[in-house]
Structure formats: C-alpha cells, structure tokens
C-alpha cells in the first residue's frame, strides 16, 4: 500500500536531519538510525532571498504555520502536539491574534544541497540494518539557511502606524539586499522601541529573543561570514520503497488522512485558538485600569472563565489527537471527527461562553468608567465581597465589618441589579449625597457595592455610622486583637451531633438571663440560627422550631445542627453581662467522629490546630459530651492526643468537660464518667483532671423550650415548671463555669515561645509556598543579571486574600508577560457546595491566603549575583532540613511538600515554554529549577544517609532565620494578615443592643 507514496517536502522543525536520514511522513519526525553511508558528490544551489512585509489589515488568515511554509500534515501534527513546537513552529504559540495593528516580516535565505538524480546514489543511502524502522521516506535533498518571521505589534495610533510602516519598508529593502538601501537610523530604532513590540521566530537560536530591527538586519547581512550557523530549513524526501524494494515497514500508523478532514480539524482549532488569543489580549490590556478602581473580584472571575475555555480547548486537542492516531492506524474513520468538532458545538461554545465573557468584560469596562466618575465625585468605592459580607450578616454586622466609626460617613448601598432596576431612586439618593457633600465637605461618601457578595440587599439605601454609634459604648475591636484580660477564649470540641450549636446559643442566654421569665420578656440572644424538632403534649405532636433567620439553607456555612456538620472553626463573641467588660469567645469546631471517617477527622483536627495557632491565648479547652453514652467515640482519644502534640502539659489544667441534656441524669455525667476515666488513664500525655471541679452539667432543653414558646407552641404547666427549674440549674452551672475559668485556671498563652512538634509542622507547611516562590524569583533575577544589559529585576508583590480561596493544581495557569518572563498569575478559586467553577475535584485544590503579583523594576541598582546565589544555596539546604524534620518527627512521613512543590513549579514553567512565546528566559528557568531540584535531592539523600536529627530548638532557629530572608518576609506577613481576616470573617460578635436587630420568624411581636 506504500508503493504509491509520493515525494514530499517538509519544513525542518526537527533540525537533526541530513542527506540520507530516514523520515516518517505521518508523525513528521526524523527516524533515528545507527549510521549513514558516506555520500558521494552533492550539488549545491543557492535559492533567491525571499522577503515579504505582511500587513495585518490585509491578511485574512491566522494560519501562521502555513505562512512559514508548513504543509497540511505537519501543521496538524503541530496543532495536535504530535511534534514539539520548536524553533519555527513555535510561532503557533504567539500569544496574541493578528489584527490591523500587526505587521509580519517574513525572511528566508536558503542554500540547497542535493544528490545527483541517479538511482544508484539513492540506493547507497539505504542500509540493510535500517530496514526495520517506521520510516516512509528518505531525505534526498535539503536546504539550510536562515528563516525568520518578525511579528510586530503597533500602538493603535494612525500617525505612528504610518511612520512605523515606513521604517518596516526600509527594513525589507535592506533584508532583500537591495543596493544602497537606506540604513535603519537610531531615530527609527527609538520609534520602534517606543511604539511596537517585536517578537522574532527563527530556526537560528541567536535570532530568537532579538527585539531590534537593526540587529536583525545586521545579523542577516553578515550571513556569509558565519555560514556554519545555518540550520536545516526544508527537507525534500523520496519514498524509500521504490529505492529499496526489500525495505519492510514495521507496524505503524500509516493511513493518510483526507485533505478535507485535515482542513476541518485545522480550521476548528485555529478558530478556537484565535478566540482564546483575542480574549486574552482584551483581558490583559484592560487589567490595569479595571483593577485600579477596585474591581478585582469580577475581573478574576473573567480570567477564571477564560481559563475554563482554554481547558476545554486543551481537552479537544487531546481528543482529536487520539482520534487522528486511531484513524491513521485504521482503528477509526473520519466520520467521528464531526462528533468532536461539530458546527453546533462550536456555536454553543461561542454563544454560551465567549459571548458572555465579551459582554461581561464590556459591562465591567463601563462599570470601571462609572466608578472612576464616582471617585471624582469624592466617593470611595467598596466592593463588599472583599469585606467578607455574608448572607447571614445584618445591617449592624455589616457596619462592623466595614469598620466605619467616623460619624460623618455616608454609605450609599446598592448593587448593579438594584441600580439597573431602580435607576430613578439611585440617582435621587446619589444626587442627595453629592449635594450634602457640597454643603458639608467634611462628610465622607462611600459607595458600598453589594454586587459581589451573597448578602441579599433588598433596596437601595443610605447608611450612616451615626445611628450605629448611638447607645453603643463598647470597643469596636474585633478579630483576635483581644488581650488575655478582656476576652475569655473557650475552644469547644465535641462529637458530631452532640448539639454544639444549641449549646452555644443556650449558654449565651443562660449567662444573660437569670430566669426563664426574664428571657421570655426580653428577646433571646441569637448567636447562630438553628432549627429543631420538638414534641409536646400527650400525643407527642411534632413541631419544627426555627430560631434566627435560618431560612436560607443554601449557605452551607451556617448549618442546621444535626443535619450537616460545621466544616470550619467559627467563633462567637458576646459580653458576659451588661456590666462586665469581659467578653466570651466560644470557638465552635468541626465535630469529631465524622461519618465520613477518620480521614475527615484528621483534616478537621488539622484545621482546628491551624486556627488555634492564630490565637493569643486559650482559657478553656472544653469537651462537650452527653451523659449516659454507651461508648465514647475513638476519635475522642485521638483528638486529645493530637491537641497535646500542639500544646505542652501546662494546658492539661485548662481542660473542661461539659455535659448537655443532663436533666435525665440529674445533672451528672452518668455512665459516661467511667468511660472518660478509662480513656484518660490510657493517655500518655499526662494527668488530665476529671472531677466535680471541672465538670459542668447543663440542659439545653430549657433553651429549646424557650424558643418553642417564641414560636407560639403551647406547653402545660407541669412542663413549664420543669423547664423553669432546669433553666435555673443551667444558669448556676454557667456561672460556676465562668468563675472556674476566671479564678482557678491559668491562662494558657499561645505566643512565639510555645514550641512544639505540631506547631513547627504547621509553621513549616505554611512556609512552603513562600520559600518556593522565593527560590523561583531568585533564579529569575539571576537569569536577568546575566542576560540584560540594563538592570532589571522582578519583585514579588503579595496581596492578601480576605475570603476563603484555593488554588487548583490541575488547571492551566493564567500566564502574564512581565518583562520577558511569563509568570503564573494566581487566580483564587472559590469552592462552594463542594464544587469549583473549574470543575476539577475539590481535592485538587489547596487553600491560599495571598495572591502573588510580580513587578518589573527597571534600572535598579546592580544586583549582587553572589548574594542571590548564596541565598539560593541556603534556601535549598533549609528545604531539605525542613523536609527531613517533617518526615521523621511528624506524621507526614510519605509526603514531601517541597519536592512536590518543586515539581509543580517545573511543570508550570514547562507549560509556559510549550504554550507561549517568547520563552527563552522561561526555558532557562526550567533548566535552573531542575538543577535546584537535583541539589535538593542531594541534600536530602545526604541527610538521610547521615541520619542526624535536628532538635526542635534547631528547627525553630532555622525557621526564624529563613523568615528574615528577603522576599520571604512580605509573603509571610500576607499569610498572617489573610488568616486574621479569615478568623474575622467567621467570627460573629453579638453586641448588647443587637438583639433588637434580630428578626425572629414568628412570635416576636
Ligand atoms: Zn481546576
Ligand atoms: Zn478550581
């Protein structure tokens, strides 16, 4: 079937070929062979220079591969990644589409070497031992020389375009070698430098990376002085079999694909690629302005959607690659191509995804304009999404989160939707504020934008700080700014379903209201919404009781007790009573004994420990249990053990046991007591006190009764009396609990002096990303030191993220060109309802606390190469030491986060090299990262061999040293800030006066 193979020619993307090399026409690759016969005489022919100026205004096709002379089959192999996108073929990675402000200069000079056309000479090429390869052709002639394509992007200014075009024409005359062509002057060069960006694609590596027209012309005009740099450009191939009938093919894909099918696939991929490039160009060019007014969140959303579109593209490429391979080897036929690239699909993608990005970007640009105008009118713009405003917030907590204490604040609250639907009202309020401001320039105008947060703002309103501060004398300090004296911190741990939420609500009310009557006539305190079932009367009638605004089940964060599990720590802060300045912070934790198994318990514990790590102190570590439990969950023991790998034995005295539903056991721990004693005696951590002194028995039933009454459920007198008694007992136990914590327990400080294995482990894990990014950026700066004549360097610029964010390890990174480096841009992924917009599994996401931007600093003072190299050596050694510590001193034996992280960096950089141009600096970076990885491995192996273990104190010394390194510090500060903001986000502070803000569904009037 191969006898009919034609003679062909191919652009030499793989430059390793020469006369007599074997070639596979399907995979477009040189077939490696053992040796080649020496060749007889060859003939040399010089081809005329080809040089063209192509104007983006007139060029219809975006097919850059066809432009440089690649044939159909080779183009498809490049698009589908059968062959690497090397040298000339790397032009397909040009990041932006051709438009009316694009110019291309195509130049090629070739020198052809060919064999005399006699069969004997051909036959000599073929060797018996090479007869069993998958080659189809043999190179009988090839040309070498220089080919370069310059892609020049101009500024959109018609006057300048005309000037630049004149320079480009000059350049083409020079390249064509026209006699007495006018030279490129320094004025021309300046014009080009200031108004264009030039990227060169060439088969000669000296030409890639050149950005000056003068340099290109000079290089090409001197081509004869250094002809040895010429590289193969084109192969002319004859089929092997007619030359050597004995030649036998091994089994390989061999069925050619019809031209029409080629075209179909190529058109589809190019069209898609063009869309991607267009939108990336739009996004990148608008980024600075949109971010400058504070619209980060919606902008990142658009970038995420672009990435999503790109993921779909990569997916299609993969599908088509498999299919083309199947067709070539006869396992499939071309009819299946339509399944993947049907017109309908393209339309759907276009309509649903692209169109909405286009529209949303346009809207965002309008909004940017609009905000810029607001700022001119002296408004400050607040995107409330950034302040952690949630569905469950109230007017009061929103003001608190905005931290607006100045009574002159005037806050105009609206969202895009409300503005659109009620423009009249918005304009009126807006006008009023501007007028007020004119009369009283001391006032402070704020536009609070609710468009990007989940709080359902019902109407456009104006808030001011004034009404908030009336009658409020308490301090506005929030977050963990509490000192040991004014806040009591209690960590509340308990099995899933033990009723922590109800207990917290109940405790707050027991501490505020002496009697049930008092609680009924005032309004109960709502710390978190709950709903539960209660039965009454002789017939056990069932009632669903709601407390607080618990209608929105969509918010998984404030879950209903019993139904779902608290996933992260949340704290509730309230005053002990009306006269006391002391506040109580109860930290609600994910329940242990999770139905999802021990894995989830570990994850929860990890999160709890991270959370505690950010507190200044703990007063009580409280286990909430039920009396008469038949068994204590095994995780109770594991929780205790893990807690005490973070704390030292001084914290043992801070342990407290609380029992709920203790009315049935006459306010004693009942049968649970002996179980606890057994567990405690088996623990190796030390003596945990368990006596009447630190055991407290409550009954949340009386609180449930109170709420049921608020829901207008009737009870008989017996029931009422019983609950009144129960309330009293719980009140006195609550008081005893607080007294005990205040007087008998020593505050347990969590400061920098607390050193433990577990804490060191968390600290190191938190340093992985900063260390790796410091290494990567130091390597970049070393490369810049050696490459650039002007002194430029890249600086890390971390930005705190104030809402829960993750980064996806599977998604293609979003690339930005900073100077001449492609850098990955962090786009935070939000996981909601256990799903991410990127559609990768939540397991593939890891939490991040800061975004990392990169700044190009030009003309910086000369960098000290030695200092950077020195820093790299120390960091690399520190990584190995940290990893050794994690492996041998903690439970993280099979996981080396530094190794995984380095591999991740290498694959990210490799991706940039494969998909974007110019990539010479990134290519160097990949090589340097590989060297780092080798050094890291060496250090690790050496430490393993020597078997020396560092003491905890040594590890802390190392941690403190590494923290102070340049670039590390800023990132670590951002992490701390991010964690603090997250704590604040999940903290609910109930002020004394806020009870009247709470909207109780029924029975509150
Ligand atoms: Zn993803
Ligand atoms: Zn994601």
Image (spheres, rainbow, N blue to C red):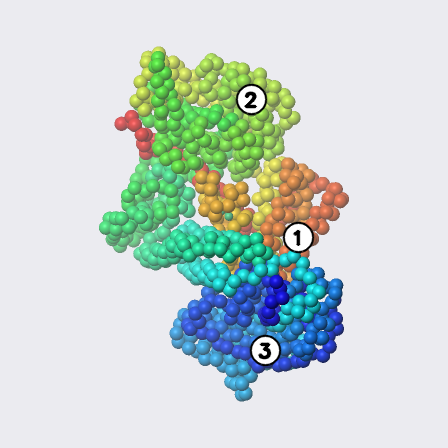
Report how many numbered discs are placed on residues in the image. 3
Q: Residue 41: percent from the left, percent from the top?
A: 72, 79
Seen at 68% across and 39% down, the residue is 888
Q: Earlier in the sequence, mark 3 or mark 2?
A: 3
Seen at 48% across and 14% down, the residue is 665
Q: Residue tagged by mark 2? A: 632
Name the mark on residue 109. 3
SS type, badge 2: loop
- Of the 4 image quadrants, the one containing the N terminus is bottom right
User: Crowding at label 2, few (<14), some or many (≥20) Cα neighbours within 10 Å?
Assistant: some
- Disc 1 to disc 2, C-alpha distance: 47 Å
In the image, the residue with mark 1 has its CB under 8 Å from the nearest atom of ligand 1: no
In front of the other: 490 or 722: 722
Query: Is the C-beta separation of discs 3 and 1 under 8 Å?
Result: no
Identify the image quadrant of residue 515: top left
Left or right of 586? Residue 21 is: right
Q: Residue 759: percent from the left, percent from the top?
A: 60, 38
Q: Residue tagged by mark 1? A: 933
């Amino acid at each position: 079937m191969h006898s009919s193979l034609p003679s062909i020619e191919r652009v030499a993307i793989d430059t390793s070929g020469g006369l007599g090399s074997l070639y596979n026409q399907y995979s477009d690759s040189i077939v490696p062979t053992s040796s080649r016969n020496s060749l007889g005489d060859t003939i040399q022919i010089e081809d005329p220079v080809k040089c063209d100026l192509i104007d983006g205004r007139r060029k219809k096709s975006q097919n850059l591969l066809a432009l440089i002379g690649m044939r159909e089959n080779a183009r498809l192999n490049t698009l589908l990644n059968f062959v690497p996108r090397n040298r000339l073929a790397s032009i397909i990675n040009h990041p932006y589409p051709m438009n009316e402000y694009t110019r291309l200069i195509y130049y090629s000079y070739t020198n052809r070497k060919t064999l005399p056309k006699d069969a004997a000479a051909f036959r000599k090429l073929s060797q018996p031992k090479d007869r069993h390869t998958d080659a189809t052709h043999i190179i009988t002639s090839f040309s070498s020389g220089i080919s370069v394509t310059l892609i020049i992007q101009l500024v959109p200014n018609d006057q300048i375009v005309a000037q630049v075009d004149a320079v480009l024409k000059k350049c083409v005359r020079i390249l064509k070698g026209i006699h007495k062509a006018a030279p490129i002057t320094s004025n021309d060069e300046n014009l080009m430098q200031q108004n264009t960006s030039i990227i060169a694609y060439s088969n000669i590596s000296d030409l890639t990376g050149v950005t000056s027209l003068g340099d290109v012309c000079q290089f090409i005009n001197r081509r004869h002085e250094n002809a040895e740099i010429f590289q193969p450009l084109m192969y002319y191939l004859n089929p092997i079999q007619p030359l050597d009938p004995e030649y036998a093919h091994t089994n390989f894909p061999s069925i050619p694909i019809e031209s029409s099918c080629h075209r179909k696939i190529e058109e589809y991929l190019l069209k898609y690629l063009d869309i991607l490039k267009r939108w990336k160009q739009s996004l990148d060019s608008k980024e600075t302005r949109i971010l400058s007014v504070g619209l980060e969140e919606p902008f990142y959303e658009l970038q995420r959607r672009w990435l999503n579109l790109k993921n779909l593209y990569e997916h299609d490429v993969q599908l088509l690659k498999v299919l083309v391979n199947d067709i070539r080897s006869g396992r499939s036929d071309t009819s299946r191509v339509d399944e993947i690239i049907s017109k309908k699909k393209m339309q759907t993608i276009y309509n649903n995804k692209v169109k909405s990005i286009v529209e949303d970007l346009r809207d965002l640009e309008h909004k940017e304009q609009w905000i810029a105008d607001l700022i001119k009118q002296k408004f400050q713009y607040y995107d409330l999404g950034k302040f952690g405003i949630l569905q469950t917030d109230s007017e009061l907590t929103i003001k608190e989160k905005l931290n607006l204490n100045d009574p002159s604040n005037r806050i105009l609250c609206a969202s895009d939707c409300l503005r659109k639907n009620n423009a009249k009202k918005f304009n009126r309020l807006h006008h009023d504020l501007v007028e007020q401001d004119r009369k009283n320039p001391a006032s402070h105008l704020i536009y609070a934008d609710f468009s990007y947060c989940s709080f359902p703002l019902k109407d456009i309103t104006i808030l001011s700080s004034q009404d908030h501060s009336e009658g409020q004398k308490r301090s506005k300090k929030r977050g963990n700014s509490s000192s040991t004296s004014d806040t009591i911190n209690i960590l509340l741990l308990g099995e899933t379903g033990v009723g922590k939420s109800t207990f917290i609500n109940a405790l707050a009310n027991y501490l505020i209201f002496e009697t049930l009557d008092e609680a009924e006539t005032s309004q109960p305190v709502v710390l978190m919404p709950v709903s539960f079932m209660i039965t009454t009367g002789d017939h056990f009638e069932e009632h669903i009781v709601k407390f607080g605004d618990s209608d929105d089940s969509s918010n998984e964060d404030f879950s209903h007790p019993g139904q779902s599990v608290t996933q992260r720590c949340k704290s509730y802060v309230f005053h002990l009573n009306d006269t006391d300045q002391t506040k109580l912070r109860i930290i609600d934790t994910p329940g242990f004994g999770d139905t999802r198994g021990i894995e989830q318990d570990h994850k929860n514990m990890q999160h709890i420990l991270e959370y505690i790590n950010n507190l200044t102190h703990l007063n009580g570590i409280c286990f909430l249990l039920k009396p008469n439990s038949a068994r204590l969950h095994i995780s109770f023991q594991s929780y205790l053990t893990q807690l005490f790998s973070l704390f030292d034995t001084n914290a043992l005295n801070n342990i407290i046991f609380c029992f709920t539903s203790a009315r049935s056991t006459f306010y004693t721990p009942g049968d649970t007591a002996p179980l606890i004693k057994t567990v405690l005696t088996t623990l190796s951590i030390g003596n945990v006190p368990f006596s009447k002194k630190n055991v407290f028995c409550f009954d949340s039933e009386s609180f449930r009764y109170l709420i049921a009454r608020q829901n207008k459920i009737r009870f008989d007198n017996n029931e009422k009396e019983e609950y009144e008694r129960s309330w009293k007992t719980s009140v006195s136990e609550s008081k005893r609990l607080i007294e005990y914590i205040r007087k008998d327990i020593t505050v347990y400080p969590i400061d920098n002096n607390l050193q433990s294995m577990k804490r060191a482990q968390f600290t190191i894990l938190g340093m992985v990303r900063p260390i790796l990014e410091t290494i990567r950026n130091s390597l970049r700066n070393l490369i810049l030191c050696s490459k650039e004549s002007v002194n430029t360097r890249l600086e890390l610029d971390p930005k705190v993220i104030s809402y829960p964010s993750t980064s996806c390890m599977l998604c293609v990174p979003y690339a930005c060109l900073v100077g001449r480096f492609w850098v990955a841009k962090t786009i935070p992924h939000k996981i909601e309802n256990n799903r991410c917009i990127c559609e990768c599994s939540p397991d593939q996401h890891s939490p991040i606390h800061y975004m990392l931007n990169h700044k190009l600093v030009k003309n910086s003072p000369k960098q000290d190469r030695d200092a950077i190299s020195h820093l790299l050596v120390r960091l690399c050694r520190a990584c190995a030491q940290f990893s050794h510590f994690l492996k041998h001193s903690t439970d993280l034996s099979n996981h080396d986060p530094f190794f995984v992280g380095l591999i991740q960096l290498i694959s990210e950089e490799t991706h940039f090299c494969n998909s974007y141009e110019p990539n010479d600096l990134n290519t160097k970076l990949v090589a340097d990262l590989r060297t780092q990885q080798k050094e890291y491995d060496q250090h690790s192996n050496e430490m393993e061999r020597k078997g020396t273990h560092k003491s905890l104190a040594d590890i802390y010394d190392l941690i403190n040293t590494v923290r102070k390194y340049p670039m590390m510090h800023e990132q670590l500060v951002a992490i701390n800030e991010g964690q603090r903001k997250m704590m604040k986000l999940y903290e609910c502070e109930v002020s004394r006066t806020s009870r009247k803000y709470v909207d109780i569904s029924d029975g509150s009037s």
